[in-house]
Amino acid sequence: MQGMQRIAVSDFSLKHTLECGQVFRFDKAGELYYLVAGDDVLKLRQADGFLEFSSSSGVGAGFVKGLFRLDEDYSCVLGSVSRDSLMRSAVLHSMGLRIMRQEPRECLLTYLCSANMSVPGVKRMADGLARKFGRRIAFDGMEFFSFPVRIGSAREVRGCGTGFRAERIAEAGSLGKGFFSRLRGLCYVDAKEKLMLLNGVGDKIADCCLLYSLGFLEAFPVDRWIRRVVAANYLDGTANERSVRDFAASYFGGYAGYAQQFLYHYARTSGRLNPVSR
DNA sequence: CTCCAGGTTCTGC
DNA sequence: GCAGAACATGGA
């Protein structure tokens, strides 16, 4: 395609990386994906061993490599995560999935939207926030909206259909870059503790922010899918959330976050781990 | 109309 | 500490 830069990639799947559930605000158009990153819209496609991209303001390959964690040794990930037959199946199901480096503030606010809400519902809320408070970006004959740096009052946030989450979102929306950059300097346990001081941020949302945006690959977000899958396959089937987290930390170790993402996507899309209860 | 959704918090033991 | 209920909203 004309005007697109190319990055030679191996051990990478754009499709699995975007569609595994870690990120909500992207749009698919045939083979093309559109992704708003900061004030930039990325258009992406993968073909013949290359990741092709162009953008509204001309970011370089370095930015894209960082965003998709292409600088990571994938064989280390696979070696660490492939501990048993279930995990090997999950990995084969979405080989090339990489944990992205999302914007921390956007990631946190988006996952605040995810409380007791479906995946399409989360995207609807996040898109609504961007449309209402973000900057309009025209690109490729379409319009996009950056994720807002300033969110309005809880009342205005509620107007985006966020329901009981509105106050939490408005509060977290006032956090500046400094808050998140300080988290980067902490160890996993301390960073998680800081996040959980925020209204509406429990274990799961804290782990999502730590894993998907701040690079803490040991974070293992336990949602209702992960809890069910881990309980049924590794524990006695009646495990509580705490025991699932403890198991993951000891069984998967430093790359637990990758294990979680492979399992989550496998559980939701393979049809081979059908819900039994809950 | 009822049930449910990548949870968290509050309440009552 | 640990179960259960409440919490807004939109889609099935």
Image (tube, coloured by chain):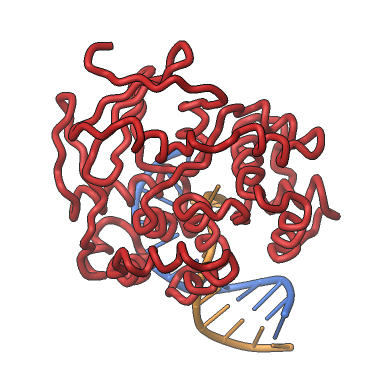
Chain colours: A red, B orange, C blue
- The residue lying furthest to the right in this view is A236
Residue at (23% x, 12% y) in the render? A2
Q: Is residue A176 above or below residue A9?
A: below
The answer to which of A102 and A9 lies nearer the viewer is: A9
Q: Is residue A34 above or below residue A178?
A: above
Residue at (47% x, 70% y) in the render? A195
Residue at (32% x, 72% y) in the render? A171
The answer to which of A9 and A266 lies nearer the viewer is: A9
Would you say A37 lies left or right of A242 here? left
User: How many marks on residues?
Assistant: 0
- Counting from the top left corner in percent of width and height, residue A165 is at 38, 65
Q: Give the quarter of the figure containing the N terminus of chain A.
A: top left
Residue at (55% x, 72% y) in the render? A190
Would you say A82 lies left or right of C8 here? right
The answer to which of A67 and A28 lies nearer the viewer is: A67
- Counting from the top left corner in percent of width and height, residue A254 is at 67, 52
- Counting from the top left corner in percent of width and height, residue A269 is at 60, 32
User: Hey, which quadrant is residue A153 in on the image?
Assistant: bottom left
User: Hey, which quadrant is residue A233 in on the image?
Assistant: top right
Q: Is residue A43 above or below residue A174?
A: above
- Counting from the top left corner in percent of width and height, residue A48 is at 46, 11
